[in-house]
Amino acid sequence: MTNQSYLWLKNYPSGVDWNMDIRAEPVFFMLQKTVEKFPDYPAFDFLGKKYNWQEIYDLSCHMAKGLQDKGVEKGQRVGLFLPNCPYFIVSYFAILMTGATVVNLNPLYAEDELAHLIEDSEIDLVVTLNIGMLYDKMEKMLHATRLKNIIICSFTDVLPFPKNILFPIFKRREMACIRSEKRVIRFNDLIDNNANVVIPVIDPINDVAVLQYTGGTTGVPKGAMLTHQNIHANAVQAKAWFHQIEIGQEKMLGVLPFFHVFAMTAVMNFSVINALEIIALPRFDLKEALKVIQKKKPSVFPAVPAIYSAINNSPVREKYDLSSIRYCLSGGAPLPMQVKEKFKKITGGIVIEGYGLTESSPVVCGNLIEGVYKEGSIGMPFPRTIIEIIDAEDKVTPMPVGERGELCIRGPQVMKGYWNNPEATADALRETGDGDVRLHTGDIAIMDEDGYIFIVDRLKDMIITNGYNVYPRNVEEAIYKHPSVEECIVAGLPDPRRGEIVKAWIKLKDGRELSVEDLKEFLKEKISPMETPKRIEFRAEPLPKTMIGKLSKKDILAEEVAKS
């Protein structure tokens, strides 16, 4: 990558070198370097039980050795089916130390979705908890898919006293009943070894560290192959962008799920490379988050706009001291100016909006921490990242300054390609003519004369709700499985809290009846809660169609706008 005269360079934030050197290194080097410098520093606080960096590293080494003893080797894929907890960070780095690939599985996925991802990614081994809602799904996968074994982690073992005693008593119904003993490997048995893991030679540029699934433009899940270089580079870039953060001295609030690519980089790996203490919650709960901020005083708080908005609008917010918050990175959906300003007024912290996607590990751009903020902008490219606005039709011609085009990316964080999907890879990663490739995002943007970038439209048929990608086609196909449904359109509607919400418009077959409640119950086993429509409208008349008879999403959205 040559240092050309890019527009953003004349306004680039002081203290950040766009042309910085980013070495290609294995992801687990970050953890090893942090342990060498900060072994006794606090690393992870889970509901009051704490670990230092040496303890996290030692557990990772023991687990890596245990995985190797079970036959896990370089190139294999191992699934993580976990909420935020110590097991996640330990398992993540243990898998990478063996040279295997992490496959992040969303615990909210429906069984059909899990089965597809397990088969597609060729997973034989999954790590999960002995919590019923997780283990029960995965046990079914032992019988329905190629999955051979489950590593089961004890939830109570990572709880502090007296929670570790009380939880199995008062939450007995939530504990899993382990039935498939022969195919279950208990975590404590797995790590009962000398920790002499044999780390294979890693080629950071080519070896895949994480297989992160995304729906792309079609709604069919595709595995983005994120190499060790991709993930390590993005952590280095984020560290450089937030250079004001004091290494080894600050706390990170981890409410975003680590299985999501945003949190994997912006919370977990960012904390590792900066030796920050992660205060982890298994899920976002507003009251719990407020209590934790007041009691444990985190200073770094990445989140989606809906979380910042929830805190802004909480009726009990004024009871809590939130002044420890200093740096926030918002992603996953557009950040409304009023949400940003209100949160800053409440906490005193800086909220900058970033932009990224799964295929770029994920962060590409960010607003300036110190400098000019332009409303509606996603800021400037991260170090060593080139943003190009290309003609959306010919996919080749650069657009003039200020004119709309497809946002394309070049940089060390851009994926290797899609797993077992050369056609999709060729469509997303296109040669530039100078021996390089660029990622075509499907987002329409402009770049102004100062190098600031603005997203103005979306080519992708995708809904972003609470930071999650929801693909209308997937939801529509699930709804069409109901025998009473004749026609269906699913689309996203703007929402001040979630960014967008999912709405379904449905025409039933003549003589059929169906309630909203019955349809949602029907969808429970077919799609995840985040995909389930928040609004459902039944229509007696046929849904609008184009001239050639296709259902017209454009027309139905126009009708929605006219009603508002």
Image (tube, rainbow, N blue to C red):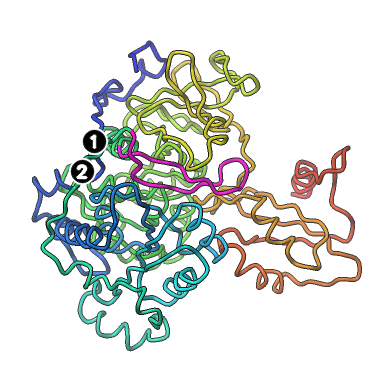
Question: What SS does tag 2 mark?
Answer: helix
Q: How many marks?
A: 2
Label 1: which residue? 25
Q: Is residue 385 left or right of residue 67?
A: right
Residue 44 coordinates in the image, percent (x, y): 22, 59
- Which residue shows up at 48% across the image and 14% down it? 433
Q: Tell me the tag on residue 30.
A: 2
Q: Residue at x 76, y 48 (%)?
A: 560
Q: Position of residue 493 (x, y in %)?
A: 66, 49
- Taking the image as shown, residue 435 lies to the left or right of residue 23, namely right
User: Which of the two discs, 2 and 1, sits closer to the camera?
Assistant: 1
* Viewer-nearest residue: 89 or 404: 89
Q: Residue at x 49, y 50 (%)?
A: 467
Quarter that holds the N terminus: top left
Residue 125 placement: quadrant: bottom left
CB within 8 Å, label 2 to label 1: yes
Front-lying residue, 463 or 195? 195
Left/right of residue 41 with respect to residue 476 in the rendered view: left
Q: Residue furthest bottom?
A: 169
Task: Kindly identify which numbered label has been placed on residue 291.
Answer: none
The local crowd at label 1, few if under 14, some if 14 to 19, many if 20 or more residues have their Cα within 10 Å, is some
Residue drawn at x 34%, y 74% as measured from the top left: 184
Q: Quadrant of residue 390 in the image?
A: top right
Relative vertical location of residue 424 with respect to residue 432 in this rendering, above or below:
below
Tell which residue pokes out farthest to the top in this image.
Answer: 5
Amino acid residing under circle 1: Glu
Dot 2 or dot 1: first in sequence order is 1
Over which residues does the magenta segment extend? 206-228
22 with respect to 307 (left or right): left
